[in-house]
Image (tube, helix red, strand yellow):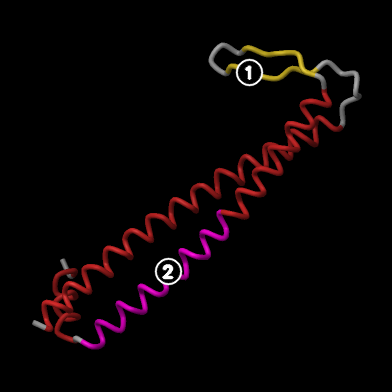
Amino acid sequence: MADETTRAAFLELQGRMIETTAKFKQVQNQMRSKEGEKKRAFLTLEELRQLPSDTNTYKSIEREHCTHLYSPTSLLISEQEQKLKDSEAAISSLQTSKEYLEKQMTEVENNLRELLQQDPGLARQIMSMSVM
């Protein structure tokens, strides 16, 4: 009975670890994406700020048909500043999520380690299954 309970606990912890790891990778990918958006907004903003205020600028509105729309430089600058702020806020939020998931993964690892130390037989079974 205890052996079955231990296996069930192991399978639950294993499932939690897989789920948490997947979420962690997803957050990392989202952070990379937001970092790219932030960098593009920053570089675009730097270029726009160098232009005289009366410069004709165009905003791409359709990638597939290369459609552009005349837009005042000041509007483009404010849009890029907003993109930069939004990216920074998203990155900050994702960083919080990442730290939480790291703690969750550490907790699950510790629980797994403790479970395997309590039941060396289970540890041997797992080791024999994974060696192939």
Does 106 lie within the magenta span? Answer: yes
Where does the image place residue 18, in percent across and percent down from the top left?
Answer: 31, 61
Residue 21 in the image: above or below residue 8: above
Residue 38 falls left or right of residue 112: right
Q: Secondary structure at mark 2?
A: helix
Q: Amino acid at mark 2?
A: Gln
Image coordinates of residue 109 in percent, x first then y, are 36, 74
- Give residue 3's mark: none
Question: Which residue has dot 2 on it?
Answer: 104
Left or right of 114: which side holds 82? Answer: right
Name which residue lies at 55% across and 43% down.
Answer: 33
**Residue found at x 79% / y 31%:** 77
From the top left corner, tell me how far across and down residue 82 is, in percent.
72, 37
The residue carrying mark 1 is 61
The range drawn in magenta is 94-118
In the picture provided, is 75 more to the left or to the right than 90? right
